Image (cartoon, rainbow, N blue to C red):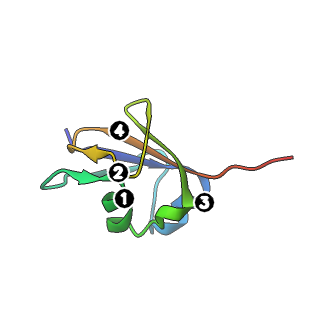
Amino acid sequence: MPLKILLSSTLRKHVPGYDPTKGVVLSPDKEITVAELCKQMNIPADRIKIIIVDGKNKSLAHVLTGVERVGLFPAIGGG
């Protein structure tokens, strides 16, 4: 099963044609970190504040094997 990446709010603008109902499906040929995934997708790592991999909070250094579900979220503010 390939890697499924779901982007929240403002991160979506970095991926042309992003469909929030489908996300992005990738099949990396080797293990990669979340930071490397972001670079590959042209998403600035400094814009990401929350990383969820298979339902658990992870860091940019987390190594992905290629079968996970990844959610990337920017900082969210409110008043």
| Within-10-Å neighbours for mark 1: few <14, some 14–19, many 20+ | some
Label 4 to label 2: alpha-carbon separation = 16 Å
Q: Which residue is mark 1?
A: 35
Answer few, some or many: residues within 10 Å of disc 3's Cα (few below 14, many 20 plus, some between 14 and 19).
few
**First in sequence: mark 4 or mark 2?**
2
What element does badge 3 sit on? helix
SS at mark 1 in the image: helix
Q: Which residue is mark 3?
A: 10
CA distance separating discs 4 and 3: 19 Å
Residue in view at x 37 percent, y 32 percent: 54
Placement of 47 over or under 79, stated as above or below: below
* Horizontal relation, residue 16 to residue 63: left or right: right
On the image, the x and y values in percent for residue 19 come to 46, 54
Q: Secondary structure at mark 2?
A: loop
The residue beneath circle 2 is 61
- The mark closer to the camera, 1 or 2, is 2
Distance of label 1 from label 2 (alpha carbons) = 6 Å
Mark 4 falls on what kind of element?
A: strand
Asked if the residue at tag 2 contacts the one at tag 1, i.e. Cβ–Cβ closer than 8 Å, the answer is yes
The residue beneath circle 4 is: 69
For marks 1 and 4, the one nearer the N-term is: 1
Q: In front of the other: label 3 or label 2?
A: 2
The CA span between labels 1 and 4 is: 15 Å
